[in-house]
Image (cartoon, coloured by chain):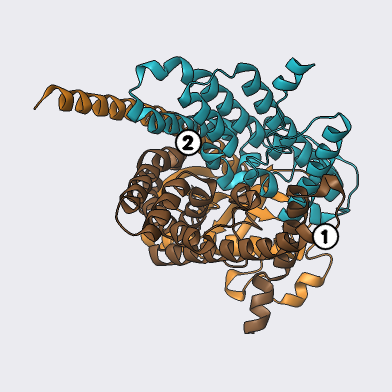
Chain colours: A cyan, B brown, C orange
């Protein structure tokens, strides 16, 4: 039981309040949330797992800039890949794709990687946690706010499940709704944690 | 740019805003302003002169990470090591802000909006002031919230997030149409 | 130069070289992606206008469009672009054909960020096609309130008008340059 408690990694979004920028504003459809979440968690995993292996070869002075450059490189490549995947979805994401380079979740993995902290299970869990939270938040915003769910399918016309023709609660798709949903989810997360007898660090 | 608030509309800098560090708010906003002015003008110039003519906008993050952030960081450290304690604080804040979604995001917004350099800089100043205003308002709300009787799970970050959402709703009313109607 | 300084210089050079390789890699992928999107846009415009589309050698730093295409065929030349139109439920990519005078002549949605956006609904584009740019678009604010003119949110119509205006301006300057 103690061991399990030690291995507990709080969800980075709902527990740690990290990497919120894209989720509050841009992730107003399921597809947007999935793309942004995937970008940040992929670069966090690659950087977090890759940097400790290479840090011996990089002089300490240059570690931080090299890591930051690598993060930006990954973000740039991911942006291009996303555009090839679905130009229309990517057009709506605008500045949030390059912003993956400085996403707090990516940066946190990067910092731990520079310090060479061993962190494989935690890294994987927090990155997947970010992806899941991004999908959950954007899906809630789109389903309740706009009455539909846009799936991240390739091509110019992503597949959309339409529940209601008129947007039932448009506010939730706006940034204000992003904050409201995030706040409610964070409260629910805390409630669930307390029910399970765990505490946020 | 004030109406299109960096925090409440673009969600930029949401993480530090919610962590709620209250110390030296004015110093940190000045630091943010400096970092942003440099970042915005550099990104604007590099984008306009180097990237856009060749269709290489995809290089933006690399340009930021390899040229702009190190420069801002260097400047911050230079300021921090020079003299007065206030400058030291500001320098450290600039150093910290150099790599953040707030600085990069505002620089991206102002560089991408088809503005001239002066307009881009004005927009970036406006964004910083707007961010600061939102922070001050949120800080006041936070103080009230600490005294109020909230359900346990809502205390702290969730309550702040919801308040930010309510404030963002208010900001939705202050948009281009509203200002247009005011000015006539 | 002493040994330590030499070492530092070497390290810096190695890092710079490494970054240069990264930048060249991204640029290469970007150019590949660009040629792909030019091909897609040319096909879309050729299908819409029934003319051959040829990319003009100019780039725009506009957030919503970056290239113009010359559509040559019978009669005066037309200009085309694929622009992003932003609404409050998401964005669409629209192929737009303009006359040399900057009037919008034809439009078709070639990609959407989500389905069911106001732009995609019937009549949204057809209603204002043919209304000259010189007369302003939309002609009067009152038009916006008529359901058959704007079947979507008036706000997205408004946003879209601004983008169309900028494209129109770009077309005018391109046409001037051509003459």
Q: Residue at x 59, y 53 (%)?
A: B21
| Residue at the disc numbered 2 | C34
Q: Nearer the viewer, residue B146 or C32?
A: B146
**Residue A8 falls in image quadrant:** top right
| Quadrant of the image containing the C terminus of chain A | top right
The x, y position of residue A188, in whole percent, is 84, 40
Position of B76 compared to A7: left or right? Answer: left
| Quadrant of the image containing the N terminus of chain A | top right
Q: Nearer the viewer, mark 2 or mark 1?
A: 1
- The chain letter for the residue carrying disc 1 is B
Position of A25 compared to C72: left or right? Answer: right
| Camera sees residue C169 | no
| Camera sees residue C111 | yes
- The chain letter for the residue carrying disc 2 is C
Q: Is residue B171 above or below residue C59?
A: below
The x, y position of residue B67, in whole percent, is 35, 42
Q: Residues within 10 Å of mark 2 (few under 14, many from 20)?
A: some
Q: Secondary structure at mark 1?
A: loop
The x, y position of residue A118, in whole percent, is 55, 17
Position of B124 compared to A20: left or right? Answer: left
Q: Residue at x 89, y 49 (%)?
A: A165
Position of A64 compared to C50: left or right? Answer: left
The x, y position of residue C81, in whole percent, is 54, 50
| Residue at the disc numbered 1 | B148
Q: Nearer the viewer, residue B12 or C178?
A: B12
Q: Nearer the viewer, residue A84 or A62?
A: A62
């Amino acid at each position: 039981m103690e061991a399990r408690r030690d291995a507990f990694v709080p969800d980075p979004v709902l527990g740690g309040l990290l990497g919120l920028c894209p989720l509050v504003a841009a992730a107003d459809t399921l597809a947007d949330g999935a793309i942004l979440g995937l970008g940040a968690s992929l670069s966090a995993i690659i950087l977090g797992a890759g940097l400790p292996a290479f840090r011996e070869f990089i002089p300490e002075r240059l570690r931080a800039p090299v890591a930051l450059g690598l993060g930006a490189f990954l973000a740039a490549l991911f942006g291009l890949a996303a555009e090839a995947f679905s130009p229309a979805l990517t057009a709506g994401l605008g500045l949030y794709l390059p912003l993956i380079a400085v996403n707090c979740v990516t940066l946190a993995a990067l910092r731990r990687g520079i310090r060479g902290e061993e962190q494989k299970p935690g890294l994987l869990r927090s990155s997947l946690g970010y992806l899941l939270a991004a999908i959950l938040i954007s899906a809630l915003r789109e389903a309740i706010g706009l009455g539909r769910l846009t799936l991240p399918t390739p091509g110019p016309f992503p597949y959309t499940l339409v529940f209601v023709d008129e947007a039932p609660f448009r506010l939730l798709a706006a940034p204000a709704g992003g904050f409201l949903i995030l706040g409610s989810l964070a409260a629910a997360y805390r409630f669930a944690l307390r029910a399970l007898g765990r505490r946020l660090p | 740019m004030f109406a299109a608030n960096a925090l409440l509309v673009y969600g930029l800098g949401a993480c530090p805003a919610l962590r709620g560090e209250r110390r030296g708010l004015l110093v940190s906003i000045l630091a943010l302003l400096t970092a942003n002015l440099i970042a915005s003008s550099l990104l604007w110039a590099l984008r306009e002169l180097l990237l856009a003519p060749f269709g290489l906008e995809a290089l933006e993050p690399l340009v930021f990470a390899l040229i702009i952030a190190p420069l801002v960081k260097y400047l911050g450290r230079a300021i921090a090591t020079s003299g007065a304690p206030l400058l030291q604080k500001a320098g450290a804040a600039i150093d910290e802000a150099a790599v953040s979604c707030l600085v990069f995001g505002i620089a991206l917004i102002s560089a991408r909006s088809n503005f001239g350099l002066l307009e881009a800089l004005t927009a970036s100043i406006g964004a910083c002031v707007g961010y600061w205003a939102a922070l001050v308002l949120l800080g006041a709300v936070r103080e009230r919230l600490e005294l109020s009787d909230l359900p346990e799970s809502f205390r702290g970050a969730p309550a702040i997030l919801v308040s930010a959402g309510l404030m963002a709703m208010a900001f939705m009313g202050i948009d281009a149409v509203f200002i247009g109607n005011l000015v006539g | 130069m002493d040994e330590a300084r030499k070492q530092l210089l070497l390290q810096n050079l190695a890092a710079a070289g490494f970054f240069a390789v990264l930048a060249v890699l991204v640029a290469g992928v970007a150019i590949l992606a660009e040629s792909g999107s030019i091909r897609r846009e040319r096909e879309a415009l050729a299908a819409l206008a029934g003319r051959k589309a040829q990319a003009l050698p100019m780039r725009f730093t506009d957030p919503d469009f970056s290239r113009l295409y010359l559509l040559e065929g019978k009669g005066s030349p037309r200009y085309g672009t694929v622009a992003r139109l932003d609404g409050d439920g998401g964005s669409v990519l629209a192929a737009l054909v303009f006359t040399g005078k900057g009037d919008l002549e034809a439009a078709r949605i070639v990609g959407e960020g989500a389905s069911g956006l106001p732009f995609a609904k019937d009549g949204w584009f057809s209603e204002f096609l043919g209304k000259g740019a010189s007369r302003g678009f939309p002609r009067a604010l009152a038009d916006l309130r008529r359901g058959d003119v704007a079947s979507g949110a008036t706000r997205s119509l408004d946003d879209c008008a601004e983008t169309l205006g900028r494209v129109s301006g770009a077309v005018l300057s391109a046409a001037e340059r051509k003459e």
